[in-house]
């Protein structure tokens, strides 16, 4: 076959009509589309590479995160451009061209709103850095709400492209929402309670809280409807936000100090001198301890407090400078050891419960039998 014949054959094939469109136009359109699919990553890196080099010159990481978030949306926009140029080569009728344009515009809007969704995280992190009062729980809520708003706006914009009456849909949803709200009062109550908890800063993620009659543990997560509290046995408890908002709650993590309160039972046979010595030396030990707050800063008491059933009560009331439970237990242990030593050196002892039993014999005088407990009374119980 001669070159002229081969050229005529290729020309005939290239101009062959398929669905009223020349084969050459189909091939060119497909090649453009494949080229866009193949090169979208390279074009994205080319565009974002320049932005990344500019972002690398700054000291903060915020602009670097923005460039990283734009990677997928830019790739999608490159693909949309390839589809647009590919379809523009094909002569379509008015109706088909309208549908294709709607599809391309819809994908374009999706890419734009996808970029907004990707930018929510770095923007909120920047807000958290600039405003230290914006805690993690509030940031998490804002992220969820912002995502929902962006998705609603994006969906509405795409519906408008296809001629779907968004206003009518919203009106219909409003009527349906009113009916649903009547049966979902608890859901909205929990939602509002969650907002109140965050607004009032009752607790944050990681805080140790105790809700009277409900739960005690560490806050792991604050959700729209409920919050997850991990008990000290590592069991998770999902508590409706309304329970956390309506019940009395103690947030132990917000404390600046931790209290030590105990009453020590001393023997009735202890002399006044011994009791005064125990009281004074105990007070001096507490004041001298570096991790127990000074009486000038917070209420501290060491006093002979009461006559108990089997002992004279020595009340000890003070606060540690740490709120850590392990450190608090160690300081309390030191205090107990010091009390044991001070009481022994003062010539006294700890009292324990004693019971007297009188047995009366008609022929003899009453006999007194004394029964004493074998285990001394726990001074910290």
Image (tube, rainbow, N blue to C red):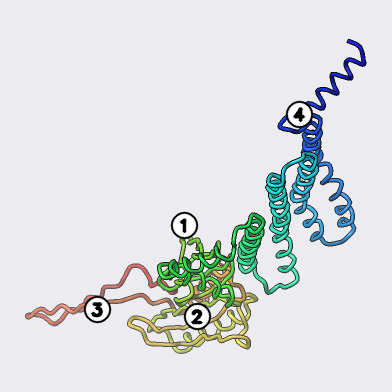
For the point 81% across and 56% down, the residue is 64
Secondary element under disc 1, as helix, strand or loop, is loop
Q: Quadrant of the C terminus?
A: bottom left
First along the sequence among labels 2 and 1? 1
First along the sequence among labels 4 and 2? 4
Which picture quadrant has residue 36?
A: top right
Query: Disc 3 versus disc 1: distance between alpha carbons?
Result: 48 Å
First along the sequence among labels 3 and 4? 4
Between marks 2 and 3 in the image, the one whose residue lies nearer the viewer: 3
Query: Disc 3 versus disc 4: distance between alpha carbons?
Result: 118 Å
Across and down, in percent, residue 351 comes to 38, 77
Q: Give the labeled residue for mark 3.
A: 356
Secondary element under disc 4, as helix, strand or loop, is strand
Secondary element under disc 3, as helix, strand or loop, is strand
Q: Give the labeled residue for mark 4.
A: 17
Q: Is residue 251 above or below residue 164?
A: below
Query: Local crowd at mark 2 within 10 Å, few (<14), some, or many (≥20)?
Result: some
Query: Local crowd at mark 3 within 10 Å, few (<14), some, or many (≥20)?
Result: few
Which mark, residue 346? 2
Across and down, in percent, residue 300 comes to 55, 85
């Amino acid at each position: 076959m001669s070159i002229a014949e081969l050229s005529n054959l290729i020309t005939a094939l290239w101009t062959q009509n398929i669905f009223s469109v020349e084969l050459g136009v189909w091939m060119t359109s497909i090649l453009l589309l494949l080229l866009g699919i193949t090169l979208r990553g390279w074009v994205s890196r080319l565009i974002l590479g320049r932005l990344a080099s500019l972002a690398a010159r700054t000291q903060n990481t915020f602009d670097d995160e923005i460039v990283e978030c734009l990677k997928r949306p830019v790739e999608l926009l490159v693909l949309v451009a390839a589809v647009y140029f590919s379809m523009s080569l094909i002569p379509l009728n008015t109706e088909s061209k309208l549908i294709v344009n709607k599809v391309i515009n819809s994908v374009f809007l999706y890419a734009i709103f996808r970029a907004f969704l990707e930018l929510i995280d770095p923007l909120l992190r920047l807000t958290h850095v600039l405003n230290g009062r914006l805690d993690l729980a509030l940031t998490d809520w804002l992220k969820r709400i912002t995502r929902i708003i962006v998705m609603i706006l994006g969906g509405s914009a795409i519906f408008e492209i296809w001629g779907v009456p968004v206003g009518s849909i919203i009106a219909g949803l409003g009527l349906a929402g009113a009916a649903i709200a009547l049966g979902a009062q608890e859901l909205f109550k929990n939602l509002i309670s969650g907002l109140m908890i965050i607004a009032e800063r009752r607790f944050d993620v990681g805080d140790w809280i105790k809700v009277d009659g409900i739960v005690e543990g560490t806050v792991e997560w604050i959700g729209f409807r409920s919050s997850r509290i991990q008990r000290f046995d590592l069991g998770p408890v999902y508590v409706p936000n309304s329970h956390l908002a309506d019940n009395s709650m103690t947030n132990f993590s917000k404390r600046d100090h931790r209290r030590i309160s105990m009453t020590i039972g001393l023997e009735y046979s202890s002399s006044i001198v011994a009791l005064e010595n125990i009281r004074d030396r105990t007070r001096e030990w507490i004041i001298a301890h570096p991790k127990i707050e000074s009486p000038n800063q917070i209420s501290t008491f060491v006093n002979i407090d009461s006559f108990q059933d089997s002992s004279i009560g020595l009340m000890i009331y003070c606060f540690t400078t740490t709120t850590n439970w392990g450190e608090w237990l160690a300081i309390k242990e030191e205090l107990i050891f010091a009390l044991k030593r001070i009481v022994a050196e003062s010539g006294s002892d700890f009292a324990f419960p004693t019971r007297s039993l009188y047995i009366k014999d008609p022929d003899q005088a009453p006999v007194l039998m004394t029964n004493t407990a074998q285990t001394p009374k726990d001074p910290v119980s």
